[in-house]
Image (cartoon, helix red, strand yellow):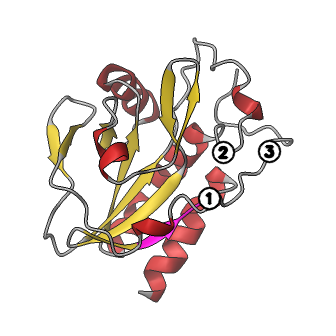
Amino acid sequence: MNLSELPTNLPIPENDGKCEHLLNAIIPPISLPNQDGNLLKLNRADTFLLVVYCYPMTGHPEKALPSNWDAIPGARGCTPQTCSFRDKYDDLIKLNALPIGVSTQSVEDIKEMTTRLRIPYDVLSDQGLLLAEKLNLPTFSVGEKKFIKRLTLIVEKSVIKHVFYPIFPPDKHIIEVLEWLKKK
């Protein structure tokens, strides 16, 4: 299975209004583990912007995706999205923005993915749904597993200044982010 290519018949996610409360919200004072297990604080007063993109999960080339994954609007496309942020990393940095990925996958799964795809920035594990619950992020479940829906938060000094939601297609989302940052 080629996780870098998107099927042409993916269902398009619709705006369910579950991110409307996020604009101008303050990121809670929490830390999440990155791909190396080191805690990264998200509530920060840095001079750069954080581009926190949340996604359900990146697939593993040797593991099957969850049942009916491609039929869930917004589920498929995490690998192409992550690779697009990787490929435009320098452009983001030039715009004084730092990308940070977040998913509910384990640190071990995130480490495998960041190594395999050569991701130059932090990807955080919200496996315990700490960030998702504190910010009331939209989620969906497959069996017993809960996933964060695909969304992106632009954060300045711990305040959410912009929310991208829903996101489709995920591999082109980086273009929207860069255009927004250029206008800021």
Residues under labels 3 and 1: Cα distance? 12 Å
Q: Which residues are magenta?
A: 162-166
Lateral position of residue 124 relative to residue 22, left or right = left
At 50% from the left edge and 68% from the top edge, which residue is drawn? Answer: 20
At 63% from the left edge and 51% from the top edge, which residue is drawn? Answer: 170
At 55% from the left edge and 62% from the top edge, which residue is drawn? Answer: 174
Q: Where 149 falls versus 143 (above or below)?
A: below
Q: Where 35 falls versus 123 (above or below)?
A: above
Residues under labels 2 and 3: Cα distance? 7 Å
Q: Quadrant of residue 59?
A: top right
* Label 3 sits on residue: 11
SS category of the residue bearing label 2: loop
Lateral position of residue 183 relative to residue 34, left or right = right
* Label 2 sits on residue: 74
Q: Earlier in the sequence, mark 2 or mark 1?
A: 2
Query: What residue type is disc 1 on?
Result: Pro
Q: Earlier in the sequence, mark 2 or mark 3?
A: 3
Mark identifier at residue 166: 1
